[in-house]
Amino acid sequence: MKQRVLTGIIAGAAFIALTVLGGYPFAILVCLMAIIGLKELLAMKKKSIFSLSGLISVLILLVLVIPNDYFSQLDLHLNVFNIVVIGTLALLIITVLSKNEYTFEDAAVSLLTILYVGYGFHAFLDVRLNENGLPMLFFILFMIWATDSGAYFVGKSLGKTKLWPAISPNKTIEGSLGGVFAAVIVAVVFQMIQPLFDSMAYVLVIAIIVGVSGQLGDLIQSAFKRYYGVKDSGTLLPGHGGILDRFDSTIFVFSLLYVLQLI
């Protein structure tokens, strides 16, 4: 427990400091987290990121994560989609060169991981770089953290009905509802202190979406780990697991809100 608390304080302080600082330091941090997230999921599949396929996967990932404004400054005369397609073809070529030691299934897992992790962290980074990006980022993060805490404490004290025991046996419907309610409370308080939207009804809609999708992101990560038979996605953060253990809800929530153009 002492190690968990110490890790949480140090990692949390560093994360908040770089988030507030923003700019290139924050962009580098997010890119590193995305690469580690990719490494963690590939490791579940028993594939190393330190290989030709792993290197290509990292390059595709970074193309997705890099903000649109940064990417346009590179003047590559290629758009993101084209580069992803080129990377996909390269991974397929490796299935031939490796004589199926690296298989079609491996390539598919790599690409799905790249899309899942890459787009989530892209949205996370892009929101921070926008006007009012810092308060918007913390607005969403506070709701995600409130969802997690609310679900835990309500589930522990009142939870009786299992939510999805095949994936996460400890989660309950009561806890899930408590998590959504906690997200709503935090969203309303935040909006009253630091208004970001013109309508409180809009804030409530976002809060409910965050409360539900944040828990879905957590369940998705649980499904990955259960399928591959691992307890944690990684060991980077002692007592907390890996990057994806800490940011599973975050990348799912930001992806959804970003693609729906709600933020």
Image: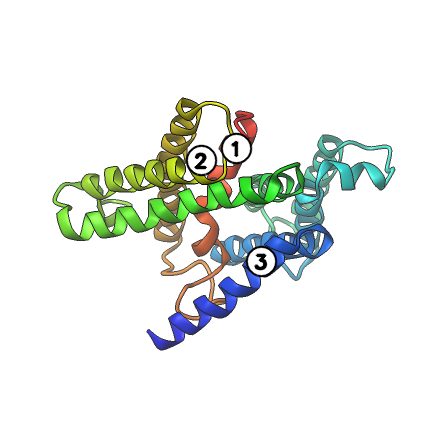
Q: Is residue 76 left or right of residue 232?
A: right
57 or 71: which is nearer to us? Answer: 71
> Residue flagged by tag 2: what amino acid is it?
Gln
Residue 131: x %, y % from top left: 66, 36
Q: Find residue 221 and name its label.
A: none
Q: Find residue 196 and name its label.
A: 1
Vertical arrangement, residue 174 with respect to residue 48, above or below: above
Vertical arrangement, residue 209 with respect to residue 39, above or below: above
Label 1, label 2: how many angstroms apart (C-alpha)?
Answer: 6 Å
Residue at 82%, 33% in the rendered image:
78
Residue 163: x %, y % from top left: 22, 40
Residue 44: x %, y % from top left: 47, 56
Q: Secondary structure at mark 1?
A: loop
Q: Residues within 10 Å of mark 3 (few under 14, many from 20)?
A: many
Q: Quadrant of the N terminus?
A: bottom left
Q: Mark 1 and 2 residues: CB-CB less than 8 Å, in contact?
A: yes
183 or 212: which is nearer to us? Answer: 183
Q: Secondary structure at mark 3?
A: helix
250 or 117: which is nearer to us? Answer: 250
Q: Secondary structure at mark 2?
A: helix
Q: Quadrant of the C terminus?
A: top right
Residue at 77%, 42% in the rendered image:
70
Task: Give the residue at mark 3.
Answer: 36
Residue at 84%, 40% in the rendered image:
73
- Which one is earlier in the sequence, the residue at label 1 or at label 3? 3
Label 1, label 3: how many angstroms apart (C-alpha)?
Answer: 32 Å
* Residue 121 seen in the current view: no
- Which one is earlier in the sequence, the residue at label 3 or at label 2? 3
Nearest to the eye among marks 3 and 2: give it. 2
> Residue flagged by tag 3: what amino acid is it?
Ile
> Residue flagged by tag 1: what amino acid is it?
Leu
